[in-house]
Amino acid sequence: DQQVKQNSPSLSVQEGRISILNCDYTNSMFDYFLWYKKYPAEGPTFLISISSIKDKNEDGRFTVFLNKSAKHLSLHIVPSQPGDSAVYFCAAIFRYTGGGNKLTFGTGTQLKVEL
Amino acid sequence: GAGVSQSPRYKVAKRGQDVALRCDPISGHVSLFWYQQALGQGPEFLTYFQNEAQLDKSGLPSDRFFAERPEGSVSTLKIQRTQQEDSAVYLCASSLETGGGGETQYFGPGTRLLVL
């Protein structure tokens, strides 16, 4: 059972426009969410995160929105740049006593930013 | 400073062969994680170390998988009697602190294992 879902395997956006990547989760125990970016032949790189007590977090061109009631989060990139072309993974953490912050990942969305 | 490094970057093994994958975390990082990423999928958790203690191995798919971190730094993931379904990218990640704060995990480039 996929606890973190990214239903769009790919997304194509024009340079300068907004990219919106979506993620849904089923486990209400998740209390921290992250977005990772991955280029081919490299490991995932942390992009931005949000705690479940917030509904928005912004860092430069990247903003993450969390809707807890809908169990949905989204990543907005504006303006999109060709260097943003990569696979984006949504990930979630359930922090529990004595445990590490193991990440539960979605299946990823391939973003392509076209000139 | 150096990031997380993994070796080898690529490994081809014959079915039934044993393999050992190495991870060098960022110096001073307490937490170390192993993930398995199959083609077209997101990474899936395998196991977690806090220093030398393996606190969570719930993601290891079978008893053919074994991980260790004897001195609390370098870690090795060993797969015995490899099967074709073990073919995947194995990712190692480390973070500075222990659980509870959502600390960022830093990933290595991964080891791509192909079992023929």
Image (spheres, rainbow, N blue to C red):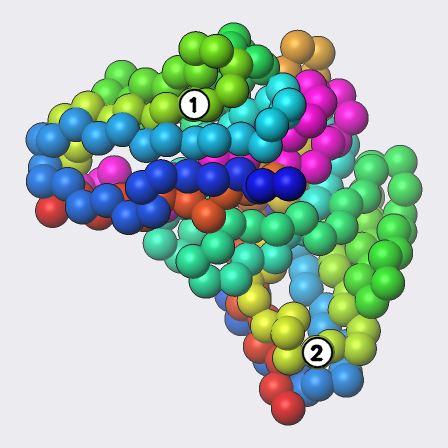
Q: Is residue A13 visible?
A: yes
Residue B26 locus on image (x, y percent) = 59, 32
Residue at point 18% right, 46% down? B12
> In front here: A11 or B49?
B49
Instruction: Tell me the SS state at disc 2.
Output: loop
Q: Chain of mark 2?
A: A
The circle drawn on residue B75 is 1
Which quadrant of the structure image shows residue A74?
bottom right
Which label sits on residue B51?
none
Instruction: Report x, y in % for residue A33.
Output: 72, 41
Magenta stretch in the rendered image: B84-105
Residue B85 occupies which quadrant of the picture? top left
- Kindly identify which residue carries mark 2: A81
Task: Give how far apart the Cα atoms at labels 2 and 1 are.
Answer: 37 Å
Q: Chain of mark 1?
A: B
The image shows residue A7 at horizontal and vertical percentages of 56, 60
For the point 64% across and 74% down, which residue is it?
A83
Residue A109 at x, y = what percent?
A: 56, 63
Q: Nearer the viewer, residue A16 or B20?
A: B20
Residue B94 part of the magenta-drawn span: yes
Residue A64 figure quarter: bottom right
Closer-to-camera residue (A28/B43):
B43
Q: Quadrant of the N terminus of chain B?
A: top right
Residue occupying image coordinates x 37% and y 24%: B76
